[in-house]
Image (cartoon, rainbow, N blue to C red):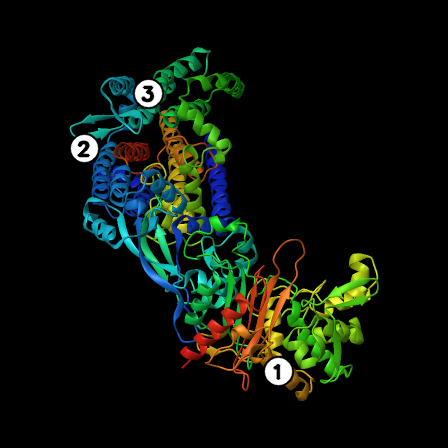
Amino acid sequence: MRIKSIQYSFITFFILLGFCLYYLQIVKGPLYRGLSYRNSIRLLNITGPRGIIYDTKKRGVALNELSFGVFIVPQEVEDFDAEINALSEILGVSESLLKRNYKRNYQAPFAPCELIRDISKRDAIIIEELKLDMQGVLVKEIPLRRYPYKEALAHVIGYIGEIDRRELFSLKSYGYRVKDFIGKAGIEKVADNFLRGKNGGMQIQVNNRGQQVKVLNVREPREGRDVYLTIDAQFQLFIWRMMRSEKGAAIFMDPRNGEILSLVSSPSYDPNISLADVLNAEDSPLLNRAIMGQYPPGSLFKLVVALAGLESGKILADQSFQCRGKLDIGSGEFNCWNLDGHGNMALRDAIIQSCNVYFYNTGILLGVEKICEYAKLLGFSKKTGIELFGETKGLVPSRVWKRIEKGEGWFTGDTANLSIGQGYLLATPLQVVRMIACVANGGMLVEPHVVKGVGETWISGHKNIRLKIKKENLDIIRDAMRGVVEDRHGTGRLAWNSYVTLSGKTGTSQVGGDLRPHAWFGGFAPSENPEISFVIFLEHGGSGGDIAALMVRKAMEYWFIHKK
Amino acid sequence: MLNLKKYKNFDWILLASAIAIFILGLLFLFSSTYPNNTDFVFRQIMWFLVGVLALLFIANVNYRKIVGIGHIFYFLTVVLLLSVFIFGSRRLGAQRWLVIGGFNIQPSEFGKLFVILSLVQYLASQKKYRNLKNIVVPLGMIAVPFILILRQPDLGTALMFVPVLIILLYVWGLPLRNLFFMVLCGALFSPFGWFLLKDYQKDRLLVFMDPGRDPLGAGYTVIQSRIAIGSGGFFGKGWLSGTQNQLNFLAERHTDFIFSVAGEEWGFLGGIILLGLYYILIKRAISIAEKTPDPCGKLLAVGLATMIGIQVVVNLSMTMGFMPVVGLPLPLVSYGGSSLLVTLMAVGLLESIAVHR
């Protein structure tokens, strides 16, 4: 019957509808549940404040300063253009800048969107007073990273910046997020994991227009951990002021434990302001010359050669060589810096007067292999392990190295050049100061470091290696180094001062061409019981006995007057 | 006039299922307009009471008398639709409403019922199929309201006349080959109908083919409705707890899309219960048609069952996104006085058929 068939078609339709419902709600239910959840739940990040960086005397060297920023809550705005216009007049910035920032920082209708940061207190008060007329505008305090020592400490502390795509890719799994600030160099970068606050967040329920309906959940952000440095910021500032007119590096280190007291590289940059200008500057202010720069160490390397000679028994302290101002080696002629010749002299005087001929002879007696062996023993051609990024290794040449790199054999002349720290030899100022510290502290190769502690924890367990070097040989070297400053003929006598006994060694490394040589001065004080070792390196700074020596004197006077 | 003996044939289950659907619907409405809902709920209850009075009144009157003045209802329909065209108030881009004594009346809703009455009147007057005139006259009868309603524009209501007419002709006894021929002609002609559609109606059809086409515009309603229903799962998110609903993601959720609220908050369980109640309603209507010996009563009962049933099927399918969006309310559930009143009047007519065997 026809009526019955109508009924059956309705049954069919209803069963079909039941299946549709089943498909949508049971089969696809989890999918749609997820979609509806995402429809209505938003997350708002709250960044935890970054840890402070302190120097060894607990002076803040990287601080969070409160600054005022203007924000706008999109969902509360009544007349966007009028409000932007008013703000632009108060702040004296262009409307287009504010609008550009708005577009860039916009997250959601309920999330305060930053229009401009770091406004003056006066402007902040004015806006705060006019707030009733400007719906949705608010002034918030935002932490701003400040580096009070500016250029002086930039190479140690580094700076922070917004995370870039590459960093985000590799650090995502560690909880870094878009728009996070991250250390880009120095301690800010090395200790970023400790310094960065733990981000909190707010879970917000929104309606179809994305407007906040209620807050579901809040997780408070946590402060990052503070970092304590071994650096003495005031001393650092003093050294920086001395160095800033030159190009080069200066490192002051406690030879007993490897704590860096000051590490300066010049030129430097101000991490408080945008780095756009310095990125491509021709004298590379971003290059940390103290740990990245590789230079021939010049006469400072004579200390290594002397030690190698004594330790291997090739020379004795009273071994003397005749200096006539030059030495014929093979077909070449190798000069002493004193072309008149030093005459006949023993090891102590050879160091004091930095006689090249003496060390040509010693080096040839030793041979390249022995020199390399002791150079490596004293830490050359490998990284010191300082916490800062970008440290380089330097280079200690060898027969094999030359064959591979230069395609020729090793000549005796190469050995002669190596013996006075020239030729292919390259070292970082940090490697040099470590070698000097090793002499000063009686044969312990320390691990230089700038971080003393993180939060409540003091860092210990630095790898300080006691070398198998005879104490009496080190005494001979130290005695000679004292002579460099105190002897009438000493090349470093300009460093002499009345506050503290000083031992040192000058270096003047030839760079070829018409350029002035690099100046070096390395040493330690007090001579009897060294508590500070140092190296000053001036790129094209002339003779190590001149400006560099005067700087050492000033630095030592400052240190021993001001240390408590 | 009131003869209690007559009421032994009164179909209490039919009435009970209608009331049960209405009460469920009232809960959905309460939630979909929450928290500013007193006005909506109050109006809906008021219309329900009016509707129940109409139902009882009509149930008492012999339906043959009502069918006998079918042509008057038809005339009334055309007049009302024309006056909508002239005086009608505009809302949501359509001119569907007449304001009479402070009430918004939707004549096309009444048209659904009145046109069925007049069709039944005509078909019942013809003993059996004799010539083409028996098809052409009913076609002409629906053509006038069809075009008037389509121009409002209200595609869903207009299109509803088509299956109603086919089923009436089928039940009336039109030979199957004539019926097939008619449907075939219609099917061949229908592509030309595309040009009769308004742009937004074309959009809806295109969006149905590809919902991602315009996710924030025409597709938004359907996508959000699907998400709402799908996210309900088996037990639903609970009354007044649907996030899609309460956070305003659903459009038209107290009228045509009210089932998305039901699906989200009451889940599969609620949906099946609602479907079951509708099934009972339609099953009872059809058994009334089967039990009455009067061909006129049979025709009317099937026509009314079809009117309600098709709206349920189409509305649920489009809310779930299995059909293009055409504006048909969910009978007894969607907010709207005219639709509620007309559905209750239809139930009254069914009761009248049951009572006046």
* Disc 1 secondary structure class: helix
Residues at marks 1 and 2 touching, judged by CB atoms closer than 8 Å: no
Q: Is residue B293 above or below residue B321?
A: above
Which quarter of the rendering shows the C terminus of chain B?
A: top left
Comparing A297 with A104, the one in front is A297
Upstream in the sequence, badge 2 or badge 3? 2
**Residue A47 horizontal/vertical position (percent):** 40, 60
Residues at marks 1 and 3 touching, judged by CB atoms closer than 8 Å: no
* Residue under the point 19% across and 50% down: A129
Mark-to-mark CA distance, 1 and 3: 124 Å
Question: On the image, numbered disc 2 is attached to which residue?
Answer: B1
Comparing A203 with B272, the one in front is A203
Relative to residue A54, is residue B112 drawn left or right?
A: left
Relative to residue B271, is residue B88 drawn left or right?
A: left
Q: Is residue A445 visible?
A: no
Q: Is residue B137 above or below residue A53?
A: above
Q: Residues within 10 Å of mark 3 (few under 14, many from 20)?
A: many
Q: Amino acid at mark 3?
A: Ser
Badge 1: chain ID: A
Mark-to-mark CA distance, 1 and 2: 133 Å
Question: On the image, numbered disc 1 is attached to which residue?
Answer: A478
Q: Is residue B183 visible?
A: yes
Mark-to-mark CA distance, 2 and 3: 26 Å
Q: Which mark is residue B118?
A: 3
* Residue under the point 61% across and 71% down: A432
Q: Is residue A167 above or below residue B169?
A: below
Comparing B33 with A316, the one in front is A316
Quarter location, residue A406: bottom right
